[in-house]
Image (cartoon, rainbow, N blue to C red):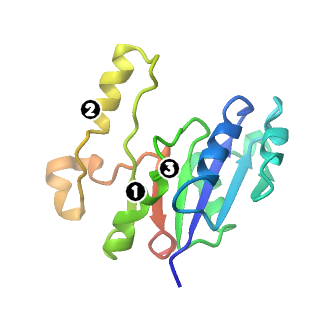
């Protein structure tokens, strides 16, 4: 049986973005086994936009309950995929192979527990934002382990929750 992928998207007032993101996720070459939107009590029609996508599971939480780490942890435990991809509501896949490319290192090397995707600035981003994205998310892939602590320090284990994927078993250890 082929490995399965879950996608988790925390949202807050994402009505202007979530339909496009879900449509792009649903048309990926690697189809998610399940998609979960965890909404922090949006007041802008996000719920209606998500409802246009019947395959998407939806959970509403109180805004005060949201926390970047614990909300994602709870969400991961409500999904079933062998791998779990976390996206933010404004993370727009650059191609139809986005999820396939993101998860590929996890499929080919069992020692890899987490991958984080490259973030590109939006076309209308200010120059400073472009420079920050280029610095933090270079065009060349890298693999890091605890052996790299002296070189990278805390950045050894840096992974952006804008677009990342975890091996479920490693995450739960």
Name the element at disc 2.
Answer: helix
Residue 150 coordinates in the image, percent (x, y): 15, 53
User: Cα distance, mark 3 to mark 2?
Assistant: 25 Å
Query: What number is the disc on residue 135?
Result: 2
Comparing labels 1 and 2, the label whose residue is closer to the camera: 1
At label 3, counting other C-alpha atoms closer than 10 Å, the crowd grade (few under 14, some 14-19, many 20 or more) is: some
Residue at the image position 52 percent from the left and 73 percent from the top: 172
Comparing labels 1 and 3, the label whose residue is closer to the camera: 3
At label 1, counting other C-alpha atoms closer than 10 Å, the crowd grade (few under 14, some 14-19, many 20 or more) is: some
Q: Earlier in the sequence, mark 1 or mark 3?
A: 3
Quarter of the image where one finds residue 62: top right
Q: Are marks 3 and 2 in contact (CB under 8 Å)?
A: no
Q: Earlier in the sequence, mark 3 or mark 2?
A: 3
Residue at mark 3: 96
Residue at mark 1: 101
Residue 103 coordinates in the image, percent (x, y): 43, 62
Front one among 133 and 92: 92
Name the element at disc 3.
Answer: loop
Residue 22 coordinates in the image, percent (x, y): 66, 46
Name the element at disc 1.
Answer: helix
């Amino acid at each position: 049986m082929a490995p399965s992928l879950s996608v988790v998207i925390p949202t807050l007032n994402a009505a202007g973005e979530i339909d496009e993101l879900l449509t792009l996720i649903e048309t990926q070459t690697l189809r998610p086994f399940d998609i979960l939107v965890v909404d922090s009590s949006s007041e802008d029609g996000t719920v209606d936009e998500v409802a246009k996508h019947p395959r998407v599971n939806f959970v509403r939480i109180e805004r005060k309950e949201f926390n970047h780490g614990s909300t994602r942890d709870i969400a991961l435990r409500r999904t079933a995929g062998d791998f779990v991809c976390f996206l933010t509501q404004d993370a727009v896949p650059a191609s139809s192979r986005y999820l396939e490319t993101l998860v590929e290192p996890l499929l080919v090397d069992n020692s890899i527990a987490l991958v984080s995707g490259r973030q590109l600035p939006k076309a209308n981003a200010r120059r400073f934002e472009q420079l920050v994205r280029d610095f933090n998310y270079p065009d060349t892939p890298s693999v890091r382990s605890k052996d790299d602590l002296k070189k990278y320090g805390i950045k050894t284990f840096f992974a952006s929750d804008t677009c990342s994927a975890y091996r479920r078993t490693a995450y739960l250890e």
